[in-house]
Image (cartoon, rainbow, N blue to C red):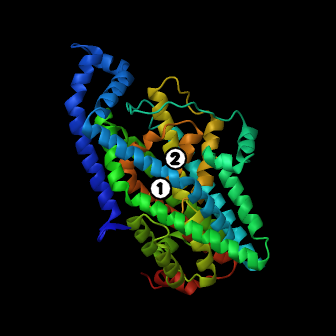
Amino acid sequence: MTVLGNIKIHWLVLAGILLGVIIGAVLNNLYVDEIRQQVLGDSYTNADLQANAKALNDALANHIKGTTLGSTLHGIGGVFLNLLKMVVVPLVFFSIISGVCSMGGSASIGRIGLKTLGWYLLTSMLAIMTGLIVVNAISPGVGADIMIPTQGREAHTPSGFWDVVVNMVPTNVVEAAASFDMFGIITFALFFGVFLLQLDEEKRNLMVGLFDAASEVMMRMTMFVISLAPVGIIGLVGFTVATSGPRIFIELFDFVLTVGLALSVHFLITLPLLCFLLTKRNPFTFMQAMSPALLTGFSTASSSGTLGVTIETANEEAGINNRISSFVLPLGATVNMDGTALFECVTVLFIAQVHASNHPDFAPLTLSAQLMVVFLALAVSIGAAGIPHAGLVMMVIILNAVGLPIEYTALIWAVDRILDMARTMTNIWSDCCGTLVIAHTENAIDDSVLFAQENSGA
């Protein structure tokens, strides 16, 4: 995606992060000593700083918001966050309906569609569970010394499994949308898409065209919001660094390693193992064949933008019949987000760990709350639409659901680009593996093409 001429947005995002860090560091350096003296007096120790971290952070945030530059950063970041929240409900609603309708109604498409959906649900759940295990094992946010200004809110976590199930069914879908109840929106959208397919052909085609168009409109709107990310990130990162200090980025090192480890396990172990068990083919030969699509996805951070390369590579380099690849891969670019779902799970639990470490009144997420994160990560990943940084757009949903302030997304933006590239490549690899497995069940693979390089000794 380009924003200014031929400049890729990731370069502008990186520039925005750097500029935000510089501006924030300058503001922090200008006012932090003054605020410490106002709150703690002329003499204080490191223990005093730790014991009064929240009071110092709040006082510094209020002081910086009172300056022209600080209020500008805060305003820009606030507008960008509101824009992200604005597009979430319609984006998820129309994307899910469009994805359900794309399966079609014939027996053949229905059969392949069920296999595709089964694969995507299986791999997404395995990815999320991998992330859940890794983030709880490493606990990158426990003890992290990160304080950022947040709006207080009460968490409403479920008390049991049936609370989660009951909350998934909205009593009023309009109220669910207005209150940001994404569980209800997702459930309604799935029902709507399923029953839309049962209309007669004329009405069905009319409605499907309408929702496809609406989905495209929301994708364009979301892309516009994402195009503002370089400016919004200056505000978010700048105000975060100004009020918290540059040290917050050091605290994110363990988080990046945690996400990277979880993605690596899913990419190099889970998916190849499934491929081998279900097709008896060498998954790493297939990975080599699909490498042009994987590398393109890594560089663009967009599953949808890479789709053309992915389909062509699957056909020409892996010998997969176009009848399978042209159905499974586009659907996967819309609804299959293994890497994104894993990232959302790890990130939300990391944020919960950080928030609990710095706010004793916030209880650590219980097992039922963590399971809620798992289900939400799986559900909202369907609506991620394959666009760059969509995971951060979708993360707003989960943070709200478990009572965590969305201001913490400012932290994640600072390291999101490289993680976005890695999780997008994981998304595409899962799409490719799913296409291989489904093509195997339909006898739609030309092994002479797939194993041509291996047989030639290349």
Name which residue lies at 75% across and 79% down. Answer: 202
Quarter occupied by the C terminus: bottom left
- In the figure, residue 270 lies in which quadrant? bottom right
- Horizontal and vertical percent position of residue 350: 48, 39
* 158 left or right, relative to 318: right
Element type at mark 1: helix
Judged by depth in the image, the label closer to the viewer, 1 or 2, is 2
**Mark 2 residue crowding within 10 angstroms, few (<14) / some (14–19) / many (20+):** many
Q: Secondary structure at mark 2?
A: helix
Q: Is residue 285 visible?
A: yes
Which residue is more in the foreground, 358 or 250? 358
Residue at screen point 42% across, 63% down = 301
| Residue in the image at 52% along x and 74% along y | 286
Tag 1: residue type? Ser
* Residue marked by disc 1: 264
**Residue identified by numbered label 2:** 396
